[in-house]
Image (spheres, rainbow, N blue to C red):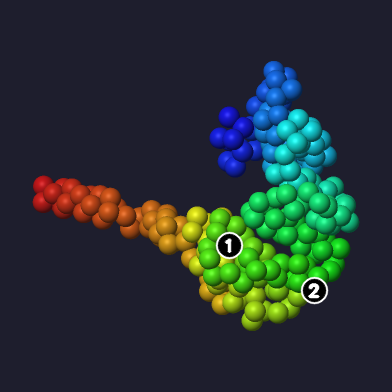
Amino acid sequence: MVARLLDEDPEGAYGYSKVALRLASRVAAVREAAGFAAYANQKYAEALAEFRAARRMTGNVDLWPVMADCERGLGRPEKALDMAGAPEVHKLDKAGQVEMRLVAAGARRDMGQLDAAIVTLQSPELASNSVQPWTARLRYAYADALLAAGREGEAREWFAKAVEADRDGSTDASDRLAELDGVEFVDVLDDEAGVEEDDVKDGATAEGPRDASAKDTQEGDGDKD
């Protein structure tokens, strides 16, 4: 239930995680799920504690990047950077290493080091034309950092590349690209609804004219009599 609700109802997921903790706090998967539920609700201290417990139980380093991001959430970007340079990072798979790079770049931005954040994201994974599950997010983060640094032309190029890689809509790169291009989207359904409401108020609906005709006919009959 935590996994099912995490994206759509993080508060509900958090509630289920607390129940799971009461029932099976010595199960590593429960501690990990509780950590992600707390993380989704921005309860970073609690999330970090649960992730640390899960790591102690399993010895696995997969949670290292999200633990570092919790440090960012707690206002400790320096600690996150320390974790980015720790030996545990070398034990991560490629996806984990990319995630760690994203966290490190975020920590640099937290500290106002935009140029350093941009350099941190420059990597073989960023330059690769191969599309992986993390490609869109990496390109998006790079584009966002470039834009924050005032490099709008380069940012537009990388937002476009992020759109190309974002096959499941994990980012809002297309919206950011449209914003840079000055494109404004209009919700046609909302406009149509607004027109219908105006028509109802003016009596110009399909029902209106028919009713009016009927009334005229009745009045006409009355005149004939």
In three-dimensional space, the C-alpha distance between marks 2 and 1, rounded to whole angstroms, equals 21 Å
Q: Which residue sits furthest left?
A: 224
Compared to residue 62, the image places residue 197 above or below, namely: below
Quarter occupied by residue 24: top right
The residue closer to the viewer here, 94 or 132, is 94
Residue 125 placement (x, y as % from top left): 63, 65
Residue 133 placement (x, y as % from top left): 56, 55
The reply, left or right, for residue 46 in relation to residue 102 is right
The reply, left or right, for residue 208 in relation to residue 115 is left
Q: Residue at x 81, y 59 (%)?
A: 107
As shown in the figure, which amino acid type bears the numbered disc 2?
Asp
As shown in the figure, which amino acid type bears the numbered disc 1?
Ala
The circle on residue 136 is 1
Compared to residue 75, the image places residue 123 above or below, namely: below
Q: Residue at x 71, y 59 (%)?
A: 102
Residue 174 in sight from this viewpoint: no
Name the secondary structure under disc 1: helix
Q: Residue at x 80, y 73 (%)?
A: 115
- Dot placed on the residue nearer the N-terminal end, 2 or 1: 2
